[in-house]
């Protein structure tokens, strides 16, 4: 089967939903953030702190290419920042966007220290980042799934039905 790439803003549930979806179908699963941390032996906040965002984006593009041995792939929220990543996902699989409202994202993340681009921004910057990215997620997705007020099981079920899994 073609890989399925889960995209969406930080905190929309890509990792939880991706691993549940994979488990429920006995498929293989990779999370690109996890892959970066495993490859480098350090955490994402450490990479941002010592090498900066640009270096992180290079590791991310590399991890994305490595990930396609898996059936279900959860990506980092900023994967769509590089058009080469979007092209890679479009050329190699199906893209599912998990769409979550800003208020739910905010409630979930609060001041999450594991997400440097969330933690270090004030409210206006967080809103700007969300509004900048939303149309990009929408444009590149093959499928859009709304996640607000829905359980993980419901979302997993909807993905299975939509993609005929
Ligand atoms: C980022 C999202 C994070 C992680 C990094 C940068 C972003 O992944 O890749 O902190 O730019 O939105 P999650 O979307 O899994 O939080």
Image (cartoon, helix red, strand yellow):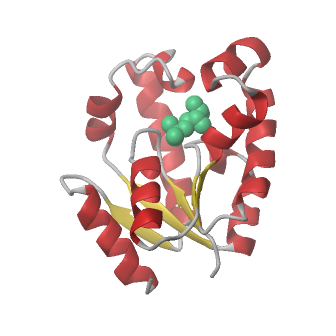
- The residue lying at 72 percent from left, 65 percent from top is 69
Q: Quadrant of the N terminus?
A: bottom right
Choose between 107 and 70: the one closer to the eye. Answer: 70
Residue 129 on image: x %, y %: 51, 34
Residue 57 on image: x %, y %: 75, 36
Most extreme residue toward the front, as rendered?
26
- The residue lying at 58 percent from left, 43 percent from top is 76
Q: Quadrant of the C terminus?
A: bottom left
Q: How many callouts does the rendering have?
A: 0
- Image height check: is 141 above or below 43? below
Choose between 15 and 48: the one closer to the eye. Answer: 15
162 left or right of 137?
A: left
The picture quadrant for ligand 1 comes to top right
Residue 146: image quadrant is bottom left
- Image height check: is 156 above or below 129? below
- The residue lying at 74 percent from left, 31 percent from top is 56
17 left or right of 76?
A: left
72 left or right of 103?
A: right
Residue 84 on image: x %, y %: 79, 56
- Image height check: is 47 above or below 100? above
Residue 51 on image: x %, y %: 79, 18
- The residue lying at 69 percent from left, 13 percent from top is 49
5 left or right of 155?
A: right
């Amino acid at each position: 089967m073609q890989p399925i790439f889960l995209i969406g803003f930080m905190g929309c549930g890509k990792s939880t939903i991706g691993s549940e979806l994979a488990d429920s179908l006995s498929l293989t699963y990779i999370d690109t953030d996890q892959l970066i941390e495993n490859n480098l032996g350090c955490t994402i906040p450490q990479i941002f702190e010592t090498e900066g965002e640009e270096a992180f984006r290079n590791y991310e593009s590399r991890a994305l290419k490595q990930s396609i041995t898996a059936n279900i792939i959860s990506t980092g929220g900023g994967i769509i920042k590089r058009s080469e990543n979007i092209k890679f996902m479009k050329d190699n699989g199906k893209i599912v966007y998990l769409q979550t409202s800003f208020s739910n994202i905010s409630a979930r993340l609060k001041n999450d220290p594991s997400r440097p681009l969330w933690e270090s921004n004030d409210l206006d910057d967080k809103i700007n980042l969300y509004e900048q990215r939303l149309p990009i997620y929408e444009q590149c997705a093959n499928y859009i799934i709304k996640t607000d007020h829905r359980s993980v099981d419901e979302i997993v079920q909807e993905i299975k039905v939509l993609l005929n899994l």
